[in-house]
Image (cartoon, rainbow, N blue to C red):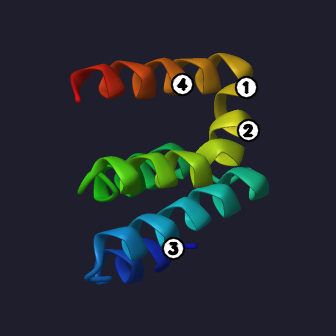
Amino acid sequence: YHDAGAVIARIVRPADRARAGIALAYALVSAGQPGAESALGAALRAATVGREESLRALELAAPSLAALGGGALLAAAAAAVDEVDRWL
């Protein structure tokens, strides 16, 4: 897991970088390793190039979000998505 973050950072396309970061976060949380929150945060930031990409990233991140914070974190993410949709 140590070098994965550096490899992901070199991915040029934001959507691909986001998908790779989400996969890393899920692997870290599943293995009980530290860094899942950071990896997931970086991945979600990478996906903020548009509404569609952001929503797709949140969809892919749902298993990691559930593992990290359970239903409360999923509900908070859903509320944030709802808030963003009101801006548009």
What residue type is disc 1 on?
Gly
Percent position (x, y) of residue 1?
Answer: 58, 73
Q: CA distance from mark 3 to mark 4?
A: 31 Å
In this view, 64 is above or below 15 = above
User: Which of the two discs, 1 and 4, labels the residue nearer the N terminus?
Assistant: 1
Q: Which residue is mark 3?
A: 2
What residue type is disc 3 on?
His
- In the rendered structure, find residue 67 and report the number of the disc placed on it: 2
Q: Dot 3: few (<14), some (14–19), or many (≥20) neighbours within 10 Å? A: few
Question: 41 left or right of 19?
Answer: left
Residue beneath the point at 30% across and 70% down: 14
Q: CA distance from mark 1 to mark 2?
A: 6 Å
Q: Which residue is mark 1?
A: 70
Q: CA distance from mark 4 to mark 2?
A: 16 Å
- Disc 3 vs disc 4: Cβ atoms closer than 8 Å? no
Q: Nearer the viewer, mark 3 or mark 4?
A: 4
What residue type is disc 4 on?
Ala
User: Which of the two discs, 4 and 2, labels the residue nearer the N terminus?
Assistant: 2
What residue type is disc 2 on?
Ala
Q: Nearer the viewer, mark 4 or mark 2?
A: 4
Percent position (x, y) of residue 79?
Answer: 48, 17
Q: Secondary structure at mark 4?
A: helix
Nearer to us in this view, 34 or 69: 69
Percent position (x, y) of residue 4?
Answer: 49, 77
